[in-house]
Amino acid sequence: MARKLTIDFLRTEAASGTALALAAVAALVVANSPLAPDYFAWLKSYHVLQIGPIRLEETISDWIKEGLMAIFFLVVGLEIKYEVMRGELSDPRKLATPVLAALGGMVGPAAVYLALSQTIGAPHQGWPIPLATDIAFALAIFGFVGKGLPSSLRVFLLTLAIVDDLGAIALIAVLFSDGANWTPLIAAVGLLIAGGVAAHKIRIAAPFWVLGFALVWYLTVLSGISTSLTAVAFAMIVPITARREDHQSPLKEAMHDLHPWNAFLVLPLFAFAKAGVAFGGLSLSQAFAPLVVAIALGLFFGKQIGVFGAAWLASALKIGARPTGASWLQVYGVSLLCGVGFTMSLFIGVLAFPGAVDSPEQIEVKLGVIGGSILSAVAAGLVLAFAGREWQGRPRASAPDDTGGPDAPLPWDGR
């Protein structure tokens, strides 16, 4: 069952990569067309949500960032909980390598960015931007070039990306949630605790889960902290155990119901709202501004160095294992793929440099994220395609003992 759910997740998220790509391309086309003024005016326009005494007024850009993206983080939280309780993350040995690789994949980009901030003058506050991996885009690219590769690589990538997202969420909570209004925040925490207790004692119908999430989200907005944090916290209280009467798990039902909305509505809308860069009047100096270069190289070089280096070190120290049946070249290809940081990197960029969507800083963030992600995607595609042909073209021995170190035989060595 765990394998089936993981495969379903991979298929849904991989398929959404096409929708993400189309939305990003559409944003670039519109932002550089006669419709550009209307596009940017739409993103800055204010819209009111009022239900009785409850009233919120935000721009379209903020509604997408704080509203729709809360659904994205809810889905990520549900996936994290499932993997920890029943999936790949429940096995400490399988957990060690991707977790350490994810940590390395955060340290590497931060180190590259901060080094460049000292040498070329990139703004210091942008260092968290290249730390994140885009699950949907990464899985979509892997699906295109990964046919015939060991299935363990897909699980490795998914597990790494989930841990990476958890780290990004923690960073968002620590770095971008200051100045909280404590009264609504305490109320939100109280609702979460009450909901968690009630969920383990009685069956809660789906409409009440929706209402509970809406209330927690509203209180979080009032508190001034990022809705991503409480969205993941809300996912943690959704029961994973199947109900006696219908043998259905509320958590799996929620994942099944929300994945399509997340993959084909939430993320494409976010991409359409955040990927629009107007190239008219863009100078060469702005295209290669320190912020652009630092983000792009942080994603491209920092991710591959951090992920691959940590995975190799975990194997060398015998605290982790290389993905079953995979070669180090294939692991390196996946490490390159982790440099695709589109959705989460853009989201963190919005938080790190708050302001208008067409401000100079936001344009440079978008250029850096898009540039680094394209470099990583192309390089990963070439490496994984080559590794796949090598894999299919060599005789394979029986499954090796992949417990370990960097000198462990490749699956086709026959040693």
Image (spheres, helix red, strand yellow):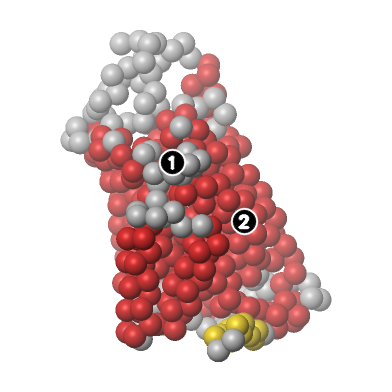
Examine the rendering and report whether any part of residue 355 can be seen. yes
Pointer 2 or 1: first along the chain: 1
Q: Residue at x 32, y 60 (%)?
A: 197
Marks 2 and 1 close (CB-CB < 8 Å): no
Question: Which residue sits at x=36%, y=15%?
Answer: 399
The residue depicted at 46 percent of the width and 11 percent of the height is 395
Q: Mark 2 points at which residue?
A: 261
Residue sitting nearer the eye, 253 or 160 = 253
Q: How crowded is mark 2: few (under 14 residues within 10 Å), some or many (20 or more)?
A: some
Closest to the observer: 306 or 214?
A: 214
Q: Residue at x 30, y 57 (%)?
A: 107
Name the foreground residue: 21 vs 172: 172
Residue 183: which quarter of the image? bottom left
Q: Give the percent coordinates (x, y) of residue 110.
A: 33, 62
- Which residue corresponds to mark 1? 244
**For residue 68, what is the image quadrant?**
bottom right
Name the spot of residue 315 as percent of width and height, x first. 25, 34
Question: Residue furthest toward the left?
Answer: 317
User: Which dot, 2 or 1, sits closer to the camera?
Assistant: 1
Residue 317 - label: none
Q: Which amino acid does label 2 sit on?
A: Trp
- Left or right, 26 with respect to 240, comes to right
Place of residue 261 in the rendered image (x, y in percent of width and height, measured from the top left):
62, 56
Q: Which residue lies furthest to the bottom in this view?
A: 53
**In the structure shown, which secondary structural element does the residue marked by tag 2 occupy?**
helix
Instruction: Decide if residue 97 is in sight here.
Output: no
From the viewer's perspective, tell me whether residue 392 is left or right of residue 91. right
Image coordinates for residue 88, horizontal then vertical, percent: 36, 37
Q: In the rendered image of this protein, does residue 66 appear above or below residue 14?
A: below
